[in-house]
Amino acid sequence: MAKKRVETKKTPPLPPLPPPSTPPQEMPEEEIPGEEAGDGSGEEDGEGSEGGAEEERGESDAGVAEESDSSEDEEEHIGYDIAGKKIRKQAKRDKIDSFLAGVDDSKNWRKIYDEYNDEEIELTKEERRLIGRILKGKTPHADVDPYAPYVDWFEWEEKGMPLSGAPEPKRRFIPSKWEHKKVVKYVRAIRKGLIKFEKQKEKPRFYMLWGDDSSSAENTRHGLSYIPAPKPKLPGHDESYNPSVEYIPTQEEINSYQLMYDEDRPKFIPRRFESLRNVPAYESAIRDAFERSLDLYLCPRTRKKRINIDPESLKPKLPSRKDLKPYPSLCYLEYKGHRGSVKSISVQITGQWIASGSTDGTVRVWDVETGRCLKVWEFGESIQHVAWNPLPDLPLLAVSVGQDVVLLDTGLGNAEEQFRAKELLHVEEDDAGQCDTKPLVRWLRHDKLDAIRLEHSKAVSSVEWHFKGDYFITVAPTILIHRLSKKLTFNPLKKLHGLPVSSVFHPSRRILFIATKKNVRVYDLSMEKPKFMKKLEPSIREISSVAVHPGGDNVIVGSKEGKLCWFDMDLSSKPYKTLRAHPKDITNVAFHRSYPLFASSSDDCTAYVFHGMVYSDLNQNPLIVPLEILRGHASSNGRGILDCKFHPRQPWLFTAGADSVIKLYCH
Amino acid sequence: MGNGGMGEEASTQVQVRFTTKLPPPLKVAARSVAVPSNLTRMGLSEIVNHILSVGDSDHQPQPFDFLVDGELVRMPLEQFLLAKGISAEKVLEIEYIKAVIPRKQDDPCPHDDWVSAVDGSNKRFILTGCYDGCARIWQDGLSTHVLEGHSDAITSVSIINKKDMESSSIIYVGTASKDRTLRFWKVDADEPSKNLKKVEPFTVLNGHTSAVQSISSEPSGDMLWAAKEADVEDESVSLKKRKSDSDALHEKSQLEGSAISTLNGHTQCVASVVWTERQTLYSASWDHSIRRWDVSTGENTWNMVCGKALNCLDIGGEGSALVAAGGSDPVLRIWDPRRPGNIAPVYQFSSHTSWITSCKWHPKSWLHLVSTSYDGKVMLWDLRTAWPLAVINSHSDKVLCADWWRDDSVVTGGADSKLFISSGISVS
């Protein structure tokens, strides 16, 4: 403060006024307005002069250094003027003078001594009022309304012309990417079940008031070892101290208790007391306590965890055999007549006749219904394979004997069919003379049987017809395809991967399956050259037989170690299922043409019948259920059943045994 | 049940009263007798015979069969009562009838090959069909006529004019064969038969494309049906109806007839046809179904699927409406086509052990049946019990055909090339 008081003033220091400590509130406000007005005018004049003086001081500020310090009271001057002369303080008036001046001057109460400028100031009426308002804590100016209604000067409504001419930014229109991401995350979590909205659990309307202590669910929080003590039986009437007479046992009854075993003896014998105070102390209290301690001591402290799994439940669920009827189960008919083991059988497509070839060198045709042998042909050499032509009106039989394949006319058709068969079997032996180029197969006439003889260079092991009845295939052991109507022979596969065991045609398409000892190769014959399509790898030791499902998409393969592999051609080249069925070699496998059945025959004298359902729905895998083991054949020279074939229309199975009997198993 | 406790003692007795519908010499007085409750049919038969012989000194003992509440007694009496829940304290009414068993076995008639068909509808002779392609007529154990002509096995034979065969000695015979033909023969049965007479067919009917399995003639004898094996190509099976009007046949012998209508519907070989009335015809097939056809419209009026391939069919029984059929299993089943919506058989007889090859209702009785099977047995059945009345074991191989003859005999032919006649069967 003192430093700033460098300003000089010539005005002499005024005697200090009585401080205006007296609260202005106490001041009577009975001032006459006219007086005030007069005061105001006088004041203004004085101020005007002072204003000029102050300006003077302001200029002097720059040049004059401030020397005058703290002891201004002691100093006689209050500052210096522009010329550097001291401005002297006014002569201090003593108290009495000032008092007297105050008494005289009615305006004295509103005069204030300004110590800085050393003068007395007379407060105007406005100033006084201002001070009063400040003291009251109000706004200094009376005409200011602090609670005036707010005037919103901003124009919120658009007036067509925006505040800024910039176009709306693009971000206003794009939904938030991060919000979207967040939402997607939540949706996924909800779908996956990571976020679960727990339903408000409904409280049961009725509940046990004191809890259910029989259930241990609540007790688990005490730890696994907690086992609730068994609840004691509630006392009944007989435990009363004064029970009814009928509860009291007679003396004989009590005596009879003594004869009973300890365990059977009643633990408590009701007694009667006149009053409660006659009841003695509990006799066996100590004993009970001891036994309870003993129980606790001997009680095992570990809880044994035992998993109870029903072994039945681990088995795959298979439909009941009863629901899968009909299937062959019982042997009703036997076809007897061969004198050697029957190597091969074939059922005619109408199901009226079966043909069989045996090691005794005969081919026989049997009536299925009666079991009567209709025809016998003697070949004098062991028959390898027989196969009916699949056309119902062409009862031809292909027989493989040694190195020959003989196409026989069975003579079972009517006259017209006989004529057709005769024409088909007519062959000119024109190439008999020219043997410069050795043909694959020679088509010769078999004079004795009025048949065609196809002379192969090596022994023929199997003959299979194409479903249209014109082509047939022989395995000798090269694969040869013959065409009956043109009397032609092809060798479609020059190179064979392994020794072929058997080969079959696809039941409805021009596809050939060739089974070698290790795998099954599938060739497409619809092109000029056979095209390799697929290789099925059963990973078994030696393939013995192969059969194609009438739908054509499933193949079963029998092996010499007794395993049966089911291939789904659409799935993979590995077996869909491998059934370990027979303890000995599987000799043949067969599919039924219309029923969902397949069978395998084996050297262990049994034939297995399976249910093999193939669904048209591609998503559903085939259903395979073992159904029946057909027994009845006798073993001969270690061989059992050599061939099995289904009846084309009935759920019947023919089996050819090494015991020279053919059996028919019916449903 | 009152007899529950009594059954344990061997000496319990039941009060019975024997009744019968038999004529007086075989009638016993209607009073109650106490008999031991563990008696079987044979014991009861002895008692009845004893009572009869007391009343009539020259009575020949004979076996009887006993009916309690319309059911034949086939086990000890106390077991029977227990099983049926009949009180043993009341007087039990037992009706006795003559036992239906063959009393006499005639000498077999030897054939050259399997006997595949037999017809006993004429009282004077038996007609048989054989696998050697010949049909034969047998009188008194001797073959009088041989009907030669078929080139393959005969599957079915039928005497056509059944109605007037008693009056006229000329009979017409139809045969079906595996050579896909039907042949008709005219036989004069009454002419003196010192030597074996050979008969030539007067009509050959072609038209079947496969073996003809069964032939059945219309009751009046004007037409006949033949069933044939399945025609595989079009999966339809036809039954051929051929007109063989008797008058026309007289004039136009050696002329070929033609099929009047074909009934399509079966999908496999039709094994048997039976023409019961003029308008209805039944057929059984290997496609597991039995169908009834309306002859005039060719409509299939009833179709029943049984789940087994069927070999034989006969219509008879109560009101000539029950269908008996056997097939590729050892069970002889009887259906009642009058029951609506019910395809469960009303009776099942399952004592055979192999396929059933033929079944025939008794021409007069509603209750009796004969059936043959590949197990070599011929069985007589009564609808009132599930056990066979009699088992004829005379054949040594498969039995292929059977028929009733003269109401009291059963003629059967089989794969042992023999025709057996079991006579003396007293079907009341």
Image (cartoon, coloured by chain):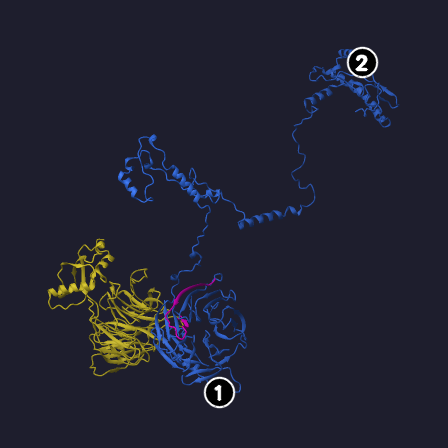
For residue B294, which quarter of the picture? bottom left
Residue furthest bottom as drawn: A433
Which percent across, then down, holds residue A127? 73, 21
The residue tagged 2 is A93
User: x, y (%) of residue A435?
Assistant: 51, 87
Query: Which sits in the foreground, B49 or B169?
Result: B49
Q: From where the camera sits, is residue B193 visible?
A: yes
> Quick check: can you spot residue A511?
no
Q: Which residues are magenta?
A: A621-648
Q: Chain of mark 1?
A: A
Give the drawing colour for chain A. blue
Q: From the rendered image, report the letter of the chain displayed in yellow.
A: B
Which quadrant holds the N terminus of chain A?
top right
Among numbered discs 1 and 2, the one appearing first in the sequence: 2
Q: Which residue is mark 1?
A: A432
- Is A133 part of what is drawn in magenta? no
Q: Is residue B92 left or right of residue A452?
A: left
Cα gap from disc 1 to disc 2, whole angstroms = 174 Å
